[in-house]
Image (cartoon, rainbow, N blue to C red):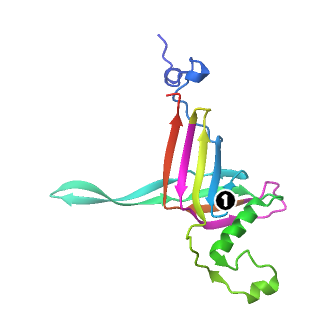
Amino acid sequence: MRLNNAYDKYNQGQLSGQVKGVPRNKYSFTASLDTIDGNVLLDKIASITMPGWSSAAMTMNSYNRKKVVQTNFDYSPITVVAYDTRDPAFIETFLKKYSNYYFAGPMNSEDRLDHFNKPKGFKLQADRNYIRELKIHRSGSKTDLNTISVYNPYVTNIDADTLDYSDSQLVQYRLTFMYEGYDIVSTNSGQ
């Protein structure tokens, strides 16, 4: 009698096309942004967090019987860690377009006189969302596809890396997104 639960759970004795229940890898993903200017492939990123949520609950007393009531929920921020590349300067170009859409001033001055003489501040736009959708595509095989669609994300924080003579790692930007909702769709034609 064989007692190997992992072997049975993941069907490791089967042919490769018949393997079921295998966890997905962290590195099998691509991401893209659907912006007003078109689709932007995020191919120069190191990592991205998947969306999530948390809820608040309150304990109520109903005639000495405790009841837990959910009061609200909040979406967890998504963090994208992107590499600062030379040519083309992907992250720099994206951040300038994003900033220019919402604000007059930061990151978009042509020269010193332009910076001091032109108006600054928030710009009202006809379309309030520069980024309409963030898509994360995960794949385990040709038939196992998982798409996470994040709706109306906003960049809420941009953290640039620290430059250091004693460090030879690659320069990265950390972008934090808040959003209005998300959806997860899995298609697996093998099941």
The part of the chain drawn in magenta is 145-172
Label 1: how many Cα within 10 Å (few below 14, some 14–19, many 20+): few
Image position, residue 121 (x, y; %): 63, 82
Amino acid type indicated by mark 1: Gly
Q: Total number of numbered labels?
A: 1
Give the answer, above or below, for where 105 lies relative to 39: below
Q: Residue furthest top?
A: 1
168 falls in the magenta region: yes
Camera sees residue 161? no
Q: Is residue 40 left or right of residue 126?
A: right
Q: Is residue 92 left or right of residue 98?
A: right
Q: For the point 63% across and 64% down, which residue is it?
A: 36
Q: Secondary structure at mark 1?
A: strand
The residue lying at 75 percent from left, 88 percent from top is 116
Percent x, y of residue 8: 50, 20
Q: Is residue 58 above or below residue 124?
A: above
Q: Which residue is mark 1?
A: 38
Q: Nearer the viewer, residue 135 or 112?
A: 135
Q: Residue at x 64, y 40 (%)?
A: 28
Question: Is residue 176 at least partly visible in the picture?
Answer: yes
